Image (tube, rainbow, N blue to C red):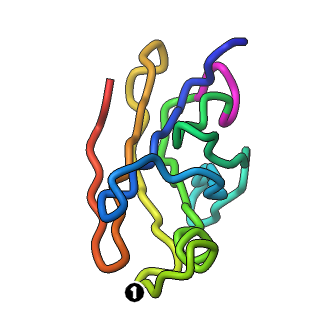
Amino acid sequence: MTISHVTTHILDTAAGKPAAGVAVELHARDGGTWTQIASGSTDADGRVKDLGPEQLTAGTYRLTFATGAYFAGIATDTFFPEVSLTFSVTEVGEHYHVPLLISPFAFSTYRGS
């Protein structure tokens, strides 16, 4: 399998395990308009390895995570029904890994490797 240009990994820090089955969408911004270019969901290890194309052009992108549905599925209340992360692709030859750490009332992210 070819790994896409953008990948993600979600860990549920409250449960201490990967967040499986979370729907994820990848959007590209063209001017003021967002266009969905890919979607997927996390596997048992909390990863999405095939989200979008092998190569993206330089620009602004957004990952949207359906965290509310994930927490509802494990009977847990949450403050964030979704998490949207906007980032810039500047080097088209590089891989962009955008991990997300979630709990019912907080989240954090960083540029991974």
Secondary structure under badge 1? loop
Q: Nearer the viewer, residue 103 or 83?
A: 103
Q: Tell me if residue 53 is in the magenta stretch.
A: yes
- For the point 65% across and 19% down, which residue is it? 54
Query: Which residue lies at the image location 37% right of the left edge and 76% below the top edge?
Result: 104
Which x, y percent locates residue 74? 57, 73
Is 46 on the left or on the right of 49, as rendered?
left
Location of residue 59 with respect to 68 vertically, above or below:
above
Residue 38 quadrant: top right
Horizontal side of residue 82 vs 50, given as left or right: left
Range covered by the magenta-colored residues: 51-56
For residue 12, above or below residue 53: below
Say which of 16 and 19 sits in front. 16
Which residue type does callout 1 highlight? Phe
Looking at the picture, tell me which residue is in the foreground, 105 or 17: 17
Q: How many marks?
A: 1
Kindly report the secondary structure that dominates the magenta region of the rendered protein: loop
The residue tagged 1 is: 79
The quarter in which the N terminus is drawn is: top right
Position of 85 with respect to 24 (left or right) is: left
